[in-house]
Amino acid sequence: MLVRQAANVLELLEYFSRRKRPATMAEISDDLGWPRSSTFNLVGTIAERGWLYEPRQRGGFYPSPRWLALARIVADSEPLPESVHRLTALIAEKTGETTAIAALAGSSALFIDVVESFQPVRYFAAVGDRVPVHASSVGRAILAQYSPEERRAIYRKIQFERFSDTTPMSGERIEAELTEAAERGYHQSSSEYIPDLAGVSFPLPVGSRRLSIVVAGPTSRCLERRSATAEVLSQAIRDFIKEQAADQPPTAAC
């Protein structure tokens, strides 16, 4: 379910991130295709709350530093450890392909850390991108960390949209994929959501968080390399887990 007013606020922020300069209400309306009256109401409300301001009189609106202050508070309250980003960057360097960390968000896997490949032809991804949890190896690597009862509750939320002939279209099919992945040792995908894209994923528990990590790229380059990619991922994750264990303070003796 999409709440249009909430979506418009987010679209407005994305608009300013692309524009990188103030915009008048008329420019916002024209650029986003919104009615003038709706633009006036939305921008006026956000400005009244202090989230937009006019850097120069009649020079247009721009997001205020209040957004940054709020984002810092939220991020600092439960930060993604720097070691996780180092892991992402290391695997991207070793494989030469786009690497991302994901978390569950409803019925999607949400990317919370991304390092893109340097290759001209690559998987373009960014922090905040979402992929269907049922139609991605990164999503299934998250699901594998949940109990069967928890997964069934998630399946009830999924609208099993078919994106290709390889898209799993039921909870039963996903369960079979999870069984196959457990036997194989890693999760994999081929064009399930995005055409000509192959991926390899592993669960990545970080503290109490159930995350996953994926390496993905064009099938022409990555499909036949999935097992080799899985070896790189597996070794890097083992080293990561050892590093995390070494950083834990020793338990006091009774």
Image: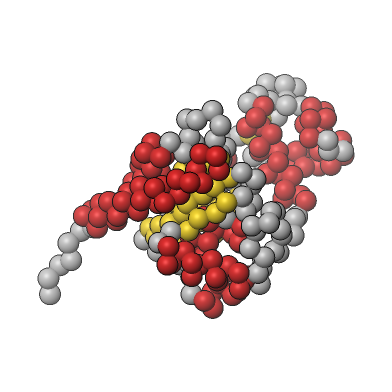
**Quarter of the image where the N terminus is located:** bottom right
Q: Position of residue 178 (x, y in %)?
A: 50, 67
Quarter occupied by the C terminus = bottom left
Q: Which residue occupies the foreground of this view, 114 or 248?
A: 114
The answer to whether one can see residue 211 in this image is no
* Closer-to-camera residue (147/140): 140
Depth check, front residue: 239 or 96: 96
The answer to whether residue 213 is above or below residue 205 is above
Query: Where on the picture, by quarter, is residue 166?
Result: bottom right
Residue 53 lies in quadrant: top right
Q: Foreground residue, 218 or 212?
A: 218
Q: Residue at x 54, y 78 (%)?
A: 149
- In the rendered structure, the answer to whether residue 25 lies left or right of residue 139 reads right
Is residue 83 visible to us here?
A: yes
Which residue does the image show at 47% across and 51% down from the upper left?
Answer: 200
Tell me residue 101's x, y (percent).
47, 49
Q: Is residue 227 left or right of residue 49?
A: left
Which x, y percent locates residue 62?
66, 30
Question: Residue 19 appears at what percent x and percent y?
Answer: 67, 27
- Quadrant of residue 14 in the image? top right
Is 98 above or below relative to 130? above
Q: Residue visible at 69% across and 64% down?
A: 160
